[in-house]
Amino acid sequence: MPVTLSVPTLTLSAAQAAARACEAKAKEIGVPMNIAVVDSGLHLLQFSRMDGAKLTSIDIAINKAFTASGHRLPTSAYKDAVWPGGVAFGINNSNGGKFTTIGGGVPVKTPNGEILGAIGCSTGTPAQDEEVAKAGIDTLEKLLKEEGKFKAKL
């Protein structure tokens, strides 16, 4: 019986590279963002608040990354399930209110579904936030391919 597990996770340097890519995409679309990157244990690795990003969306960005990594799905996947009568109605009250169903949180996965972490972005519309987060995912995918270990998948 194994006593320990080896769990893949993002490094700080990878999280910083992802955040830089997110910042570049946010500048490109003209929306300053709060950008959070968490590891596979849901711990914050990197946080950036761009000049002009909404102060009220700092925690939202962190919660988007927390949710995407912890539930292994983009936060936008829950948008229809959380309304009254939906299969996940009330889930946003779980985890001390940290679970969010607002689009903009995207997990980083290996091909076999292992979670490496997630990126959460907030200030724009949910679609803009997700677009910016995906720019970070694209960067991580390139880095992972170069490393020859995993390919990130949404």
Image (cartoon, helix red, strand yellow):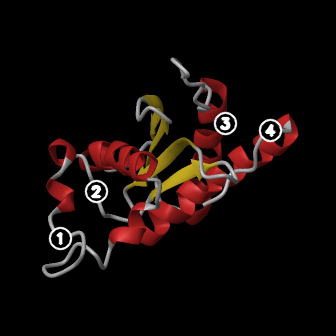
Residue on which the image places disc 2: 100
Question: Left of 127 or right of it: where is 112?
Answer: right
Residue on which the image places disc 3: 17
Q: Residue furthest top?
A: 3
Q: Locate residue 2: give its quadrant.
A: top right
Q: CB under 8 Å between callouts 1 and 4?
A: no
Label 3: state its secondary structure: helix
Q: Earlier in the sequence, mark 4 or mark 3?
A: 3
Disc marking residue 89: 1
Q: Is residue 134 among the parts visible in the rendering?
A: yes
Q: Crowdedness of circle 2 by 10 Å Cα count: few (<14), some, many (20+)?
A: many
Label 4: state its secondary structure: loop
Q: Is residue 81 above or below residue 74?
A: below
Residue at mark 4 to residue at mark 2: CA–CA distance: 31 Å
Residue at mark 2 to residue at mark 1: CA–CA distance: 12 Å
Residue on which the image places disc 4: 149
Q: Crowdedness of circle 3 by 10 Å Cα count: few (<14), some, many (20+)?
A: some
Residue kind at label 1, given as amino acid type: Phe
Q: Position of residue 41 (x, y in %)?
A: 44, 32
Q: Is residue 71 above or below residue 43?
A: below
Between marks 4 and 2 in the image, the one whose residue lies nearer the viewer: 4
Q: Earlier in the sequence, mark 2 or mark 1?
A: 1
Residue at mark 1 to residue at mark 3: CA–CA distance: 35 Å
Residue kind at label 4, given as amino acid type: Lys
Label 1: state its secondary structure: loop
Between marks 2 and 1 in the image, the one whose residue lies nearer the viewer: 1
Label 2: state its secondary structure: loop
